[in-house]
Image (tube, rainbow, N blue to C red):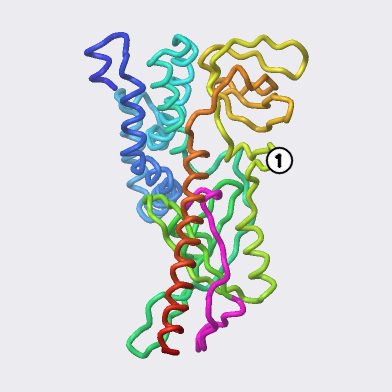
């Protein structure tokens, strides 16, 4: 960003820089923020064991180059810069021309930045959490399949697959958007399992995890009732079949015409506005929330066109998986019939 500012006072490429680093290098910020509580605990333990360390810190903080600020204020700077970047992009959007390349660049950077923000959010809440047993796919040298414990955190828009590392510490093994979860019965054929019970098992598939790949977990609940509960809550998804969408998984439109609100509850839109659609009606109206300022209201669908956002991509991914699964079942059925026919010849 500093190099861009020195080369061009208008900062035309500033949002591109933010988007590039947010998409590729944001993991360092996430790890740093995740470790902040342990930084504070380490400093507390060091000060308790060796008071001289606190004296040295006070001397450093009194230095003019530190502006008499405590060490903690410097440790939280990375986190503060993330929120400032969001404010910066929002201000850029307010001053850019509607439909311009600069506006599209700023919106792309803002979406990437919001997506990369830490787990805690006012729009995210915990739906269910709990421990399950995972059955390994491969057998060991004795022909047995191993069971290990995992801990699931299901939020309204996100699933975390973790391993417990203490009373209140967890290591995230995998995570996925909630709309990219598929659940099914655990075993197509009943097996004699020494360490597990097929009646309490189900399969959890993450269609596109944080690595961009598909991962599957064969899980066992403690009771059959718990299995049913987990399968219901994991498979629950509003797909907009009645024109109602979850705000964390909804279509997105870009306005192609200006519309001025005619009555209370409607939303005035400008050319190029990007809006998340929350609800559709049969008479041609959309309810949405504008991405830039969060304002919500109704507007006619003729003044906007749907854009290919993550909602559309996830929908296509689910449809592709279902087609492949159906094709595999048909091929397996044909193979079984062919084998049976050959046996009777």
Look at the numbered disc 1 and give the secondary structure of its residue: loop
| 55 lies left or right of 326 | left
Label 1 crowd (10 A; few <14 / some 14-19 / many >=20): few
Identified at 46% across, 84% down, the residue is 340
The answer, for residue 85, to whether it is visible in the render is yes
| 150 lies left or right of 212 | right
Q: Is residue 129 above or below residue 293?
A: below
| 345 lies left or right of 64 | right
Q: Is residue 320 above or below residue 90?
A: below
Q: Position of residue 35 (x, y in %)?
A: 41, 48
- Locate residue 242: give its quadrant: top right
Q: Quadrant of the N terminus?
A: top left
Q: Position of residue 34 (x, y in %)?
A: 43, 47
- Specify start and end residues of the magenta stretch as a single range: 175-200
| 143 lies left or right of 200 | left
Identified at 67% across, 19% down, the residue is 300
* Residue at the outermost front position: 345
Q: Position of residue 196 (x, y in %)?
A: 53, 82
Magenta segment includes 287: no
Identified at 63% across, 64% down, the residue is 230
Q: Quadrant of the C terminus?
A: bottom left
Between residue 303 and residue 29, name the one nearer to us. 303
Between residue 99 and residue 12, name the one nearer to us. 99
Q: Is residue 25 above or below residue 176?
A: above
Q: Is residue 320 above or below residue 332?
A: above
| Residue at numbered disc 1 | 242
Between residue 250 and residue 162, name the one nearer to us. 250
The answer, for residue 165, to whether it is visible in the render is no
Magenta segment includes 184: yes
């Amino acid at each position: 960003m500093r190099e861009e500012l020195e080369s061009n006072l208008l900062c035309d490429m500033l949002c591109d820089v933010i988007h590039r680093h947010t998409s590729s290098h944001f993991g360092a910020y996430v790890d740093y923020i995740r470790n902040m509580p342990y930084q504070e605990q380490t400093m507390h333990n060091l000060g308790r064991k060796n008071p001289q360390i606190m004296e040295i810190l006070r001397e450093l903080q009194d230095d003019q180059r530190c502006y008499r600020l405590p060490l903690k204020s410097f440790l939280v700077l990375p986190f503060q810069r993330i929120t400032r970047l969001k404010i910066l992009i929002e201000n850029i959007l307010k001053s850019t021309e509607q439909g311009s390349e600069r506006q599209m660049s700023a919106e792309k950077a803002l979406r990437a930045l919001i997506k990369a923000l830490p787990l805690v959010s006012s729009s995210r809440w915990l739906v269910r959490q709990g421990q399950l047993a995972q059955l390994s796919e491969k057998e060991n040298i004795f022909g047995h399949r191993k069971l290990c414990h995992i801990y699931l955190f299901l939020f309204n828009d996100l699933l975390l697959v973790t391993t417990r590392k203490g009373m209140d510490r967890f290591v995230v093994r995998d995570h996925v958007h909630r709309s990219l979860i598929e659940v099914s019965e655990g075993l197509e054929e009943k097996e004699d399992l020494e360490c597990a019970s097929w009646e309490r098992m189900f399969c959890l598939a993450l269609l596109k995890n944080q690595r961009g790949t598909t991962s599957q977990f064969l899980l066992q609940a403690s009771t059959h009732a718990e299995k049913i509960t987990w399968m219901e809550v994991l498979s629950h998804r509003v797909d907009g079949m009645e024109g109602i969408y979850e705000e964390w998984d909804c279509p997105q439109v870009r306005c192609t015409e200006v519309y001025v609100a005619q009555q209370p509850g409607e939303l005035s839109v400008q050319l190029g506005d990007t809006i998340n659609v929350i609800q559709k009606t049969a008479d041609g109206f959309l309810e949405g929330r504008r991405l830039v300022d969060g304002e919500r209201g109704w507007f006619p669908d003729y003044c906007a066109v749907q854009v290919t956002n993550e909602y559309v991509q996830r929908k296509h991914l689910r449809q592709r998986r279902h087609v492949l699964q159906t094709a595999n079942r048909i091929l397996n059925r044909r193979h079984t019939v062919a084998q049976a026919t050959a046996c009777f010849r």
